[in-house]
Amino acid sequence: MPSESDDLQQPVKLSLPLEYQQEIFNELRTEDELLILARGCGLLRIVTNLLHSYDAAGNNLILIVGAEDRENGWIGEALAEHAAISGSPKARGLSVVNTDLMSVGTRERMYANGGIFSITSRILVVDLLTSLLAPGTITGIIVLHADRVVATSTEAFILRIYRQQNKDGFLKAFSDNPEAFTVGFAPLATMMRNLFKRMKANCRR
């Protein structure tokens, strides 16, 4: 599995103009975190810069879980722009896996070649359970809309499989819905359990 230092040796130019965004990026590169950011503070910008830092290495297998169609479009365009600006020859951009029309063989080849994939939970859980995708080969998982991950959700089951069979890969979760963490009993602690990992929460207003 590629190391963090290997990734950073590749040409990477960030587009994070604000100091707090740069601080968050640096933390995310070294820590597994649940980042809760207020709306309008550039959550997707931070996510795409983080993804580009891994994409530039060209030897990672990164999975994005929970992205909506419009977010896939935004992330894909941002990664292409980052690759062009950075001059990263190994960057491959975003591949979206969201339909059963993509054959099992095609997905297997894509996983083997590595890259950044935004994949629906329904497809991912099947690929993990059928061993089409070995959890140990995954460099890391990015979870968007982490506030939607509940104990009985498919996403929580996926993360449990991942953590049980991959002790080295990273897991970074994001939410721009702080209000969701103020409802119920110990909502933040509950969410941390749902993510099935020893991670710290990074809450910024």
Image (cartoon, rainbow, N blue to C red):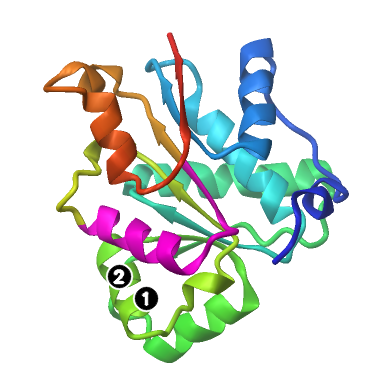
Q: Residue furthest left?
A: 184
Which amino acid does the dot numbered 1 rest on? Answer: Leu
Highlighted magenta segment, given as a residue range: 154-172
Which residue was labeled with disc 1? 128
Main secondary structure of the magenta stretch: helix
The residue under the point 41% across, 65% down is 164
The answer, for residue 49, to whether it is visible in the render is: no
Q: Position of residue 32 (x, y in %)?
A: 54, 40
**Can you give x and y, in whole percent of width and height, for residue 16 in the image?**
67, 23
Q: Is residue 162 magenta?
A: yes
**SS of the residue at dot 1?**
helix
Verify whether residue 205 appears in magenta.
no
| Residue identifier under label 2 | 125
Disc 1 to disc 2, C-alpha distance: 5 Å
Corner quadrant of residue 136: bottom right
The reply, left or right, for residue 113 in relation to residue 72 is: right
